[in-house]
Amino acid sequence: MNKNFLLKYKILFKIYLLYYALKYKFFINKKTYSQFGEDLVISNFFGNFVGKYVDIGCYHPVKYSNTALLHKKNWSGVNIDLSETSIQLFNYCRKKDLNIKACISDKKENISLYLVSDLSPLNSVDTENIEKFKLTNFKKVYIETQVFSELVLDNFDFLNIDCEGNDYKIIKSIDLKKYTPKIICIEIHSKNQELIYNYLQSFDYELFEKKDVSHIFKKI
């Protein structure tokens, strides 16, 4: 590929990131940013409290975000995603957050990753997503997984997990005796529901509310 074209693309992308960061800071003020209104439930629970969040599979600082409303209320935290483009957007929009490109799992290993695009909510390590969403245009790459405890050192108040089928493996890799979020929002499907429910109940979390595939649990 022509070097001048690549340089021009990088410059244009940086301009776009700056534009979006300014738009996010000064012009994007919505009642809800979540896909199913999850952020309203979470925000109402915490009220005026200002705390810390961890968002795994953060995808985008605005679109489908369960933490944008909290961030607008002066929360901060850690955002983790597979996509470099996602993390660049977070770096520009949420400069005080720790934004990490990583694939979280219960151990370090090399695995296959199925990329639909540089910025897609369907990027996943789960092969079932290919059949479920009838994906034909995707790229298979290999990535080394990382463990949660090496990336997140401090406790936090809200945990969000949306990782397209890998949610149970991620939640069980998080030591819920060391980390004690007051609220956990996690994507639930038929194949992982019983596993996730049983796991969270064993650490004294009970179902608080359902918003479509997002199930919200609170610490008893």
Image (tube, rainbow, N blue to C red):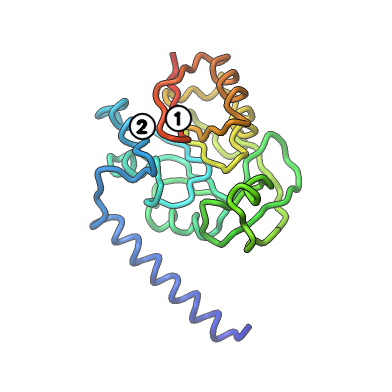
Q: Residue at x 49, y 22 (%)?
A: 180
148 shown above or below 204? below
Q: Label 1, on which residue?
A: 156
Residue lying at the far right in this picture: please name it: 110
Q: In which quadrant is the N terminus drawn?
A: bottom right
Question: Residue 38: horizontal and vertical position, in percent?
Answer: 37, 35
Q: Residue at x 72, y 55 (%)?
A: 142
Q: Are marks 2 and 1 in contact (CB under 8 Å)?
A: yes
Q: Which mark is residue 84?
A: none
166, 160: nearer the viewer:
166
Left or right for 14, reference 21: right
Q: In the rendered structure, which disc, 2 or 1, sits on the residue that comes first in sequence?
A: 2
Helix, strand or loop for disc 1: loop
Left or right for 175, reference 41: right
Question: Residue 104: horizontal and vertical position, in percent?
Answer: 62, 41
Q: In which quadrant is the C terminus drawn?
A: top left
Q: Label 2, on which residue?
A: 51
Question: Residue 166: horizontal and vertical position, in percent?
Answer: 62, 39
Question: Residue 49: horizontal and vertical position, in percent?
Answer: 29, 28
